[in-house]
Image: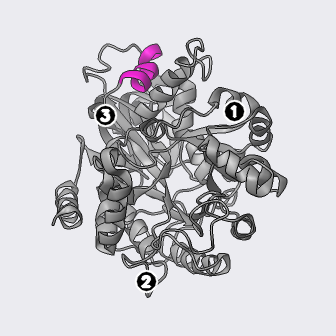
Amino acid sequence: MDRKPNPPRDSRDFRGGRDERDRRDQRSGGGRPSPGSRPAPAPAPVPAAVAKSGVPHGATESGWLPDCVYTGGNFETGLAFFADTLGRLTRFSREPADLAMARRLDGQAALPGLVNTHSHAFQRALRGRTEPRGREALERLLVRMTGEDVFDTARITFLEMLLSGVTCVGEFHYLHHQPDGSPWPDANHLSREIIRAAHDVGIRIALLKVAYARGDFRGDAGSAPARFRLASAEQFVRETEVLRVAVEKDFPADEAWLGIGAHSLATMPLDAFKSIAAYARTQRMRLHAHVSTTAEENAACLAEYGRTPVALLAEHGLVDKRFTAIDAIHLGEDEVKLLGSARAAVCVCPIAEHSLGLGVAPVEKLAAAGAGISFGSDRNLQIDLLKDARMLEYSLRTRGQPRSTFAADAATALFQAATFTGARSLGATGGALEVGRPADFFTVNLSDPSIAGSEPDALLANIVFAAERRAIRDVWVGARQRIANGRHALQGPMVGRFIDAQRRIWGP
């Protein structure tokens, strides 16, 4: 085949954050190049795609029969599910012939793949080095980390995500320049390396290309760290448009796509913020930004603009259903209502936020107001979205609230945040095991000591609140198995190259 498959007539394009996710319409998935190869615009031939899925029963359909599958908000037993050669779920069945034809996943439960809404992959290289000397370690990383190191660090980060059940990531990418701060000959070089790393690992990626202009509120233009700094909003838009066209050409629409990020109002003056937001709206891209992470940020924004971040962005029409507020910890009641009435999303990163002592977003109020809640791994100190979910719930309880503060059924609400709402925030195709969505799912070993003995009615709560990461056994993305028995096919080389990169960065 020499072109991408045409989607069905009733589908809508997810690329750049289309509205299909908000309407819960069904659509087709894209082809899947094999891991380790260079990006190619055409999907793999049908026989290769089926062979890679590991399903032996035919050349036109893949099927799986776990002990139970999470669909429609419940675990169902005796239910097989099937995908076409493009990795799109086509049907669920209890017919004896279908059950016999499906690949048996004995002792396993299947769940939709997790969605990591907010990641800084390059900061994975800082793990274990930020606690005593965070600023010093970051400065050393920035002057030593090469483009090759960025690629190898992104691969190990995305590998860890797959191993933890994440099948889609929003990469909030603001490391743009060479170690000396000068632009690369190709201004989008590191963006391409991040996407190439995701392709090699086999994870879906929304690359949120991030604008970063100054060091802080009222700072001079160009006061941002040299490797982050953009020349102007206009140049940022031009470079992003070049990248958008290239990504659309080289990848299926739901394997890799672009969104826009503004690091924050502290680092992006309002006029520049508005310029890149206008471009995002023209291209129907998602727009993400850190807002109200600290009380000091709110005070500085008030001093410069007379408004807090959410109020200021809303006043200028920038808060809508395609906007995701990152952190959003220090919000007033009016700001909660603004985000909720706009159906905006809020991404919380509990592990990272706790490591920095930042506090907890008022997620129970945000959810009640209509905002969507999702999770991110942020600095990638740890990569475990289920741990983020339980940490959020437990943190809410420490504020003197009753149990199950996030929702009456906390496990279901937290899992929804880690899947469907995260996908909506990124404009992604997954987030649920439903006909028309991609076959992105992970399985857990029902005999793992952390969840052994769970009855179907208590299984989701056990997975959300108790499952250890080792319980995750297999992971599929677009019906292609990426993790088998807790291991990636390219895991050894990926880990080896990352170890070499770390030695180069932190050695003498």
In the image, residue 5 above or below residue 286: below
Question: Which quadrant of the figure has residue 146?
Answer: bottom left
Q: Which one is earlier in the sequence, the residue at label 3 or at label 1?
A: 1
Q: Position of residue 295 (x, y in %)?
A: 63, 41
Judging by the rendered image, the residue that carries numbered circle 2 is 184
Residue name at image x 18 percent, y 59 percent = 499
Label 3 Cα neighbours within 10 Å, binned few <14 / some 14-19 / many ≥20: some
Q: Main secondary structure of the magenta part?
A: helix
Judging by the rendered image, the residue that carries numbered circle 1 is 366
125 displayed left or right of 456: left
Residue name at image x 29 percent, y 30 percent = 471
Task: Determine whether label 2 and label 1 are within 8 Å by CB.
Answer: no
Q: Is residue 55 magenta?
A: no
142 displayed left or right of 438: left
Task: Identify which amino acid the numbered label 3 is placed on.
Answer: Arg
- The magenta-colored residue range is 456-466
